[in-house]
Amino acid sequence: MQRTPPADARDRLLSGLRQCIEEKGYRQTTLTDVVRAARASRRTFYLVFATKDDALLALIDKINDDLVRDLSLAVDDHSNWRNQVVQAIGVYFDNVSRHPAVHLCGIRELPYLGVSAEPVIRRGNDAMVAIIHKLSDNEEFRREGLSPSPRPLAMMIIGALNELVADTLESGRDILEERDLAIAVTTALLATNFKDSGVADA
């Protein structure tokens, strides 16, 4: 009896779940759908994940990790700070546009998984707070008198982006059409100087 999954089983199952979410949504997706899309067996699935919800948690973790990695690689910290915002928002929206239904699922449906989803939500928020802080901690921001983004400000940016993405996707609008608005709002928020406000850095 097989006791260990194939080496690529996790990646194939997550890819299968992602495909199903994009095609029919998470709630309508069954375990049979996932294993069929992944070209795997139910036995293999249960060697990797306990439930469909566990697979979703792993998929959202991966989506969040990919976004943070792409942001780290794409932003040129030697360019004007406003250009850095344009680059970062561009990466964010490009990620969303590749897998819109999964991003919407992460924003709207993930919280309904309750306690099991809380660590994933926290990890995602913490990772985004850290990358926003890191991306705003360079000479080009300091040249304009701007300090690294504190956690409360980063959380405001994350919340605004999430709601804009969710509303846009739920309304059937093209997510890329809202990129300029996201750039303008994020730039305005980051332009706020918190050095003397008493707000602690992240």
Image (spheres, rainbow, N blue to C red):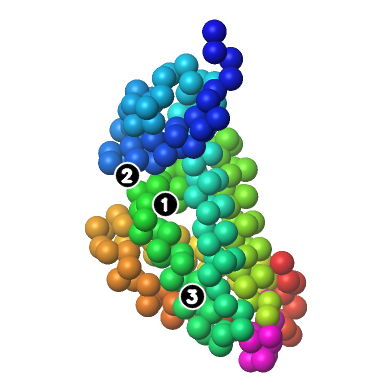
Q: Could one spot residue 166 in this view of the protein? A: no
Of helix, strand and loop, which one carries label 3?
helix
Q: Could one spot residue 70 in this view of the protein? A: yes
Q: What are the residue bounds of the magenta stretch?
A: 139-148
What separation in Å lies between label 2 and label 3 (alpha carbons)?
26 Å
Q: Amino acid at mark 3?
A: Gln
Q: Is residue 59 above or below residue 150?
A: above
Of residue 178 and residue 135, the one placed in the foreground of this image is 135
Q: In the image, which is nearer the foreground, mark 3 or mark 1?
A: 3
Q: Residue shown at 47%/78% (left/top)?
A: 86
Q: Earlier in the sequence, mark 3 or mark 1?
A: 3
Q: Amino acid at mark 1?
A: His
When asked about the image quadrant of residue 27, the answer is top left
Instruction: Quickly name the residue at label 2.
Output: 22
Using the image, tell me which numbered label, if any, was put on residue 87: 3
Of residue 33 and residue 159, the one placed in the foreground of this image is 33
